[in-house]
Image (cartoon, rainbow, N blue to C red):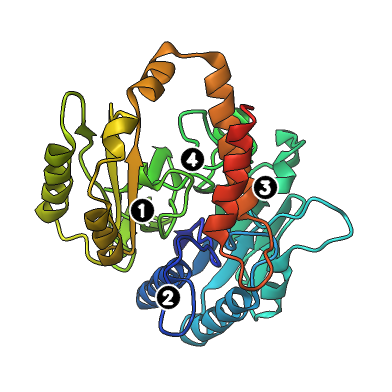
Amino acid sequence: MRLVHLADLHLGYRAYSRMTSQGVNRREADVFNAFREALERTVSLQPDIVLIAGDVFHVPRPGNLAVVQTQRELVKFRQKCDAKIVVIAGNHESVKSSDNRCILELLSLIPDVSVVTQKPEAIATDDRHAKIFCLPHSALEQFDPVQIRPDPDFTYNLLMLHGTVDSDRINDYGGYDIPADLMEMPWDYVACGHYHSFTHLGRNAYYAGAIERTSNDIWKEANESKGFVEFNLETHAANFHALTTPRPTIDLPAIDAHGKEAEEIDRLISDRAQQVDITDKIVRQRLINLPKSIQRQLDYQTIRALQTRATHYLFEARSPEANTRESDGNETEKRQGSLLEQAREFLQQQELPAGVDRDRFVATGLSYLAADEI
């Protein structure tokens, strides 16, 4: 018996201001392209079970386009593959009030798609060979490991959850910790979601990672492959399938501007961009130790040209004063940075009126917080 483990799809994710010819946010389209490829590759594998370990959608109330496209792709998948699909809710689509319902419940209307959104629940395959114990995000808030244990009446016992295994693996805010006792039970496979990098946790436990770069700090994942896990329950053989569609992300080497004039910095910026093809890619160029007096003299016409070539070109300059504050390790600065990241995540999940640019909305909100020196 074989399974495919997907996680952290983040369908409906939007970033930057580029649009497709159909008027769809470029990054939202990228994520759906990765989702389609993942499903097509899964069809070719013809597994017995497909596990989707949370954060199917990027926000609790995704746009109509994201919902309709997701249902359409899963219906097409069901027509080509008989695998049972089991989905749990992650922190991004979980609702916080009892009078709301999780958007994932719509997917349960598709034949052979089981969805668990709130409480711990066990789902058995039709042949009763495998039992999947599901722990969505909300179930981990006050979870007692005694509630779930492998069932000896089944050949295979699987655990699927969405949370944080340890503090070294956090790239998204809002997840609950996973009890260590739970992970140590004799599961035949543990499908984890929430951490966006493919990770073998030991024994038969894995983070599949995200299918695209949608975390708070995509630059840490610039050189990582995105994809999903195929696992053979009989042989315990795991295979990570890297996707080809995720948009390339390039974190260019930082430029140290200390002691340099504007003309030399301009040349270095151009040289960095010429060393790789940045066309249609997501790119960051960092400058450190850049005095504001020199920053004002830079050739911004060239920088704007680079921004036009790339899907997104982030020009990130840091003054010597900013580096000093960071190296001092001031606790206030650390708390401010943490709070700003949480604020960024909150603002990215808010519903916006039609025509409101999300990047500008988020940037404006963060600028207000930074101005108040939180």
CA–CA distance in space, label 2 to label 3: 25 Å
Is disc 3 in contact with disc 1, using a CB cutoff of under 8 Å?
no
Residue matched to label 1: 235
Query: Closer to us: mark 4 or mark 3?
Result: 4
- Who comes first in sequence, dot 2 or dot 4? 2
CA–CA distance in space, label 4 to label 3: 16 Å
Q: Nearer the viewer, residue 364 or 344?
A: 364
Residue matched to label 4: 171
Give me the residue at 40% from left, 72% from top: 42
Residue type for callout 2: Arg
Tell me where residue 53 appears, x and y as whole percent: 56, 55
Image quadrant where residue 101 sits: bottom right
- Who comes first in sequence, dot 3 or dot 1? 3
Give me the residue at 21% from left, 30% from top: 257
- Who comes first in sequence, dot 1 or dot 4? 4
Residue type for callout 1: Thr
Q: Nearer the viewer, residue 362 or 119?
A: 362
Tell me where residue 191 appears, x and y as whole percent: 51, 50
